[in-house]
Image (cartoon, rainbow, N blue to C red):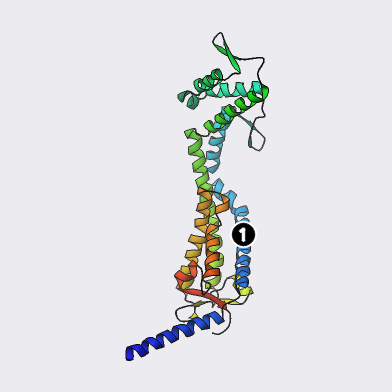
Amino acid sequence: MEKEIDQIKEEEKLIHKENLIKQNRPFLLTRYVAAFIDFLIMVITFIVLLTCFEPLIINSTNYNNYVTNAQIVLENSGLYNKNEDNFFTQKEYDKTIYDQIITSYYSSDNYAKENNKLDEYNKAKSESTFYTKVDDNLVLKNDVDEEKLKNFLTDQYQKALAFVKTNPIYIQNINKSFTIFFLVIVLFIAIDVTIFYLIVPLCRKNGETIGQIIFKMKLIDTRTISQVKKWQILVRYIIILAFDYLLGATLYLKFSSGIMLLPILITSFCIALTKLNVGPHDLISQTMIVSRKDI
């Protein structure tokens, strides 16, 4: 009997706690606006950090050497135009130039010669209807369909462009340079998130971020409905950093920019759909955002 009474009391306490929390939840839109303000401030800070310190960090590594080595591979291929800013662009179509640069690249580049690319190209030409053999040389016919010839040579040119980027030297240097750049980006993201989701909340009695301060919100410990603990702020920060931001950066690296916001979208949906409007970082740290008043 006593056990049943204790169980009922515990259930009543739980219901009372949930009702108390629900009554003090901020409006969902207000929560999103506060989060957006935090994000906007972080973006501005990230841009400032990147502008001021990225050149210093990059120049202290071999990043520029790796980029230069990769560019040398492209430049030596003769397949690109290179401007004063070291940007490489594709050459405009010209039937004579396209044939010359493809032949020159395949016949002079060691990597291309190892893969018999010149033989492959000449085979494609001989099997087409545009060339005829004269004294062991493939010569362009006079009465060819220019549009079809353009399609053929453009396709061969694109294949050459794709092949040059499979050169192990190019791949190795591009990968190394991109790794350095990615680590620099991750470093600045970590600094950014640490400032606004760890240092600022730790300096506040109720663990708020700047956006939450503006909209008069605070963090609470959902176990006791009391002031949030320092360790909870730390755990919350680690989840936000790892899931919302570092995972997003990794997704960008592996896939595309469009998917990098997926973790933040998942968090946003969790906040909207859960009973107490909590995200993964809140669930794990056992915290919750409420209006800044005694509850």
The answer to which of 263 and 174 lies nearer the viewer is: 263
- The answer to whether residue 282 shows anywhere in this view is yes
Q: Which residue is mark 1?
A: 43
16 to 270, vertically: above or below: below
**Which kind of residue does numbered mark 1 sit on?**
Val
- The answer to whether residue 62 shows anywhere in this view is no
The answer to which of 60 and 202 lies nearer the viewer is: 202
**Residue 20 locus on image (x, y percent):** 52, 83
**Residue 107 locus on image (x, y percent):** 53, 21
**Residue 23 locus on image (x, y percent):** 56, 82
Q: Tell me if 203 is positioned left or right of 114 in this view.
A: right
Q: Tell me if 83 is positioned left or right of 239 in this view.
A: right
User: Tag 1's secondary structure?
Assistant: helix
Residue 14, image quadrant: bottom left
124 to 244, vertically: above or below: above
**Residue 270 locus on image (x, y percent):** 52, 67
Q: Determine the residue positioned at 55% across, 41% down.
A: 64
204 to 127, vertically: above or below: below
